[in-house]
Amino acid sequence: MAKNLVIVESPAKAKTLHKILGREFDVTSSMGHLVDLPASKLGVDVEHDFAPHYIVIHTRRKLAKQLLQEARGKETIYLAPDPDREGEAISWHLANLLRDADRPSRKQDGAKSAVKPRTRASSSASAQLPKKIFRIAFHEITPQAVRAAVQHPGTIDQKKVDAQQARRILDRLVGYSLSPLLWKKVGRGLSAGRVQSVALRLIVDREKQVQAFTPQEYWTIEAALKTAAGESFTARLERIGDKDASLRTQEEAQRIAQALKSEAFVVAHVEEKEQKRYPKPPFITSTLQQEAFHKLGFSSARTMRVAQDLYEGLEVGKEGPIGLITYMRTDAVRVAQEALSAVRAFIKRQFGQASLPDRPRAYKARKLAQQAHEAIRPT
């Protein structure tokens, strides 16, 4: 039996990691969050510092017990959910559940959950946990990145846990406060949220601007022409004398177009110039979604589902599951030095030194970017 247990949040990711880590590691999945605020009530003690009351999700109780059973007898447990706030919160809740792995199971008040989850994030939580529970994080699921993470495990980032918890509490407070008002004033089944409500306000304000806009009519004139060699091209009327060709009515446009039909067209001047087009910055989450929409017609949700699959690993021929891109939730345009070195070596080998810039191109991050992860790139 393997002495090490790795817990991730998805079966696909577990399959890819198991292939990389081999027989010395068991890899299992939590299927996302095991612990959350209760669905039937607010779950936040507003009178006592907004303390959340977490419970094991009803549909995940069996899975929670199964994870505890798998944890028993292991020497080391590695928590490997995604390297973001949600992943850190999943790790924190898992650590709290797993601290009881070698103790008798105990029931939560009024529920048949395997353990009683903690209700508050605490900076001293790691000190109360078994020493053999570690947090590992990687931004690409490749053998090098995964093995490096296992060789240099860390601890749970409490600031990320606190950030996720604050966001979850805000979601609950806003949703539980405003949704009933919508049901009363507008109709049943509607919902309000921390982000949803603000986004709706922005949409309404923009729509009011559109409705208040007074359209102005304008016309353009284009001529279908041919060169002496028979090459076709289109020319647009830009100026009339020394004035811009600003045509406001159909009658004016038709009058000028009719007059042009009897004129001879001459190429008076040809200007040639060389233009440089610089590559766009590496993908971040938003630009990946935009490009997928423009080029493929994908919705943002579909793009993220596909990106999640590519990150967690897909079957590639006889090689089995392989992680194909770096972590897809990022606002950073930087690329890891190892990847830059590999790309530069490839360019030099394939195209020669002349095609290689003296130094890698650097892009400026957007204002307020967190830059916790590198840009999205193939692995």
Image (cartoon, rainbow, N blue to C red):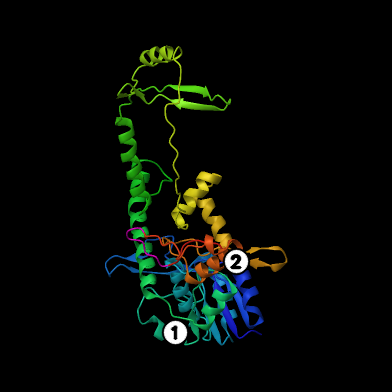
Residue visible at 52% across and 49% down in the picture: 292
Q: Quadrant of residue 125?
A: bottom left
Q: Earlier in the sequence, mark 1 or mark 2?
A: 1
Disc 1/disc 2 C-alpha distance (Å): 50 Å
Mark 1 neighbour density, 10 Å: few (under 14) some (14–19) many (20 or more): some
Q: Which amino acid does label 1 sit on?
A: Leu
Q: What residue type is labelled 2?
A: Arg
| Viewer-nearest residue: 355 or 29 | 355
Residue 295 percent across, percent down from the top left: 54, 45
From the image, tell me which residue sits under label 2.
Answer: 349
Please determine whether, in this image, residue 287 is positioned above or below residue 344: above
| Viewer-nearest residue: 72 or 180 | 72
Q: In which quarter of the image is residue 318?
A: bottom right
The C terminus appears in which quarter of the rendering? bottom right
Q: Which secondary structure class fits the magenta region best?
A: loop
Residue visible at 41% across and 69% down in the picture: 54
Q: Quadrant of residue 221?
A: top left
* Chain part drawn in magenta: 366-372
> Is any atom of residue 100 visible in this view?
no
Mark 2 neighbour density, 10 Å: few (under 14) some (14–19) many (20 or more): few
Q: What SS does tag 2 mark? A: helix
In this picture, residue 18 sits left or right of residue 318: left
